[in-house]
Amino acid sequence: MSFINDPIGFLAEWITNFLSGFLPEAWVIFIVTLLGVIITASFGLIIVIFLIWLERKIAARFQDRLGPNRAGPYGLLQTFADMIKLITKEDVVPEKADKLTFNIAPILSVVAVLLIWAVVPFAPGWIGTDLNVGVLYIAAVGSFGILSILMAGWSSNNKYALLGAFRAVAQLISYEVPMLITLMVPVLLARDMGMMTIVESQNLWYIALAPISAIIFMVSSIAEVGRTPFDLIEAESEIVAGYHTEYTGMKFGMFFAAEFLHAFTIGVIFAILFLGGWRGPGAEEFRLLGVVYLMLKGLLGYFIVMWVRSTLPRIRIDHMLAFNWKFLTPLSLMLLVMTAILDKIFGDTALRLPLLLAGNVLVLFLGWLALRWASRRQTKTRRVFKKRPVAKPA
Amino acid sequence: MTVEQAVFLFTSFLILFSGFMMVTRQNLVHAALYLVVALFGVAVIFVLLEAGFLAVVQVLVYIGAIAILMIFAVMLTRGNATEEQESMNAGFGWAMLLSALFAFALIVMLGQWADIGAMAPALDAGRSTIEELGSALVSPDGYVIPFEVASVLLLAALIGALVVARPQKGGK
């Protein structure tokens, strides 16, 4: 493999050959793997800088203003300024707070998001670790983030932080259910749980085969991250700052960075599962093009998240939970069963696309009927005044 | 000492340490967090045994659902964050004696097992482990009956929780 076609493979081979000269093989493998881990984790953390700037600019443009444009050209250095500000802030720990838990919670929050990047397939052959249960691994790692919220809320020794943490965890574990169910739809279509295999079997992007499942996955992922319209977790007007009330300085910076990175990560996961991942013209030959395609699609997902954020108001917690349990979960279950049956029968024929699309539209129609029935039941129209004859000119 | 053995020793030490800390902590939330560490150690052991699916499911179900539920229960029923409990009760002596006897019996029994140093039998590489697991769960001469019975049990638990948590109709 030459350098242009496969830079990472070329570099890995070069380093392995170089180190094998004077180190035993186990150490060489260990060092090369460690380098891979460091590069993947650093990529995640460094891209947060760009993401925060992008978020502020795009949110500003949605609100018909410019956004940060003073710190550096187009405000590109704004995030560095924010980082310096956060680092130089005083690190306040409440007196009766549980010190170890208090300090570990933000770290665990960032770790939970970075662990997802271990199974993201950047290009053919470039993946942190090709688990054959990659999809389930993503769901499992999300639970570390939930644990970190509980730890943060409880260890602050603050009633509001604790209440905020409870509400946040209730929301997160509720929205995990439709997320996991719709996560199974690409697994069904690809017949495998490994992320690389899912991308490689997307000759036709799965968003065409399962559009409603893709939308439900996007909605529940936005709820998982805690973005508007589901940002009751950190709503300043409601619960001060929720579970990170007592966090100052860089610890708050870690929660902040973890949230933005999580939002981008779900954009990338959405791109991998439904938009074809690194697939595109020329990706098999020039691996870097695969990375470019994946990042572009991931940024599209991130743009959708920001778009929804700038458009919709916040949803109340009881409406949020009712929406999840009474609408999203039954709908996603129906879609899973329908996709399974149709794909098993017509999977290898040319009827796969039109039949699955028709099935999705049918389920969407049924869901719309159910919503209409539910809203009609709630609002009863009644006549306030008796019907009176209209006066006519003589 | 291979890398696998080193990882196994480190993980076993971690599990034993967090298990010991879990039963001796007086702060219940600390005990629950040590339980999470112990469960994560068990997931690492599953990985060492080449059961990747089980490791991921262990993290997803035990840490992601059961441990969080336990922490919720502790936090909702103990209002004070720094409330401490007595970590030993009157039956401590008898419990210690029984545990020591049990551990001794286990060690003697395992020591007399002839296959303790044997390698695990290799699975046929035709089908992946997940496919094997899936087929075993739904095949009639596999484990389909325990699978379905477990689903019915979970349904019963769900209905029971709903009945218990439902707001009373008509007021009291």
Image (spheres, coloured by chain):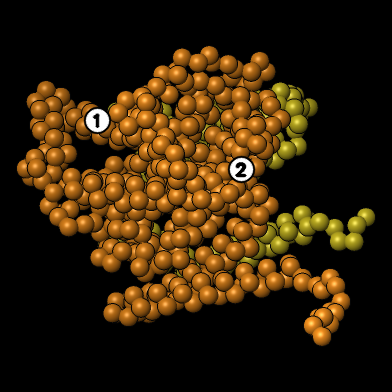
Residue sitting at 29 percent across and 48 percent down?
A: A296
Amino acid type, mark 2: Leu
Q: Position of residue A105 (x, y in %)?
A: 53, 29
Image quadrant in which you'd find residue B24 = top right
> Who is closer to the viewer here, A160 or B148?
A160
Q: In the picture, one chain is orange; tell me its letter.
A: A
* Residue at 73% from the left image edge and 38% from the top image edge: B76
Q: Is residue B78 left or right of residue B147?
A: right
Q: In the displayed structure, does residue A153 sit left or right of residue B60?
A: right
The answer to whether one can see residue B97 in this image is no
Residues at discs 2 and 1 both on one chain: yes
| Image height of A219 relative to A26, above or below | below
Q: Residues within 10 Å of mark 2 (few under 14, many from 20)?
A: many
The relative height of residue A172 versus residue A24 in the rendered view (above or below) is: below
- The extreme bottom residue here reads A394
Q: Which residue is mark 2?
A: A232
Give the mark, 2 or 1, whose residue is nearer the N terminus. Answer: 1
Chain B, hue in figure = yellow
Check the residue under mark 1 and report the chain it is in. Answer: A
Check residue A371 in the rendering and tell me which mark sits there, or answer none: none
SS state under label 1: helix
Q: Amino acid at mark 1?
A: Leu
Residue at image location 63% in from the left, 46% down from the top: A170
Above or below, comparing residue B104 to residue A120 in the picture: above
Chain of the residue under label 2: A
Compared with A178, B35 (above or below) is above
Disc 1 designates what residue? A35
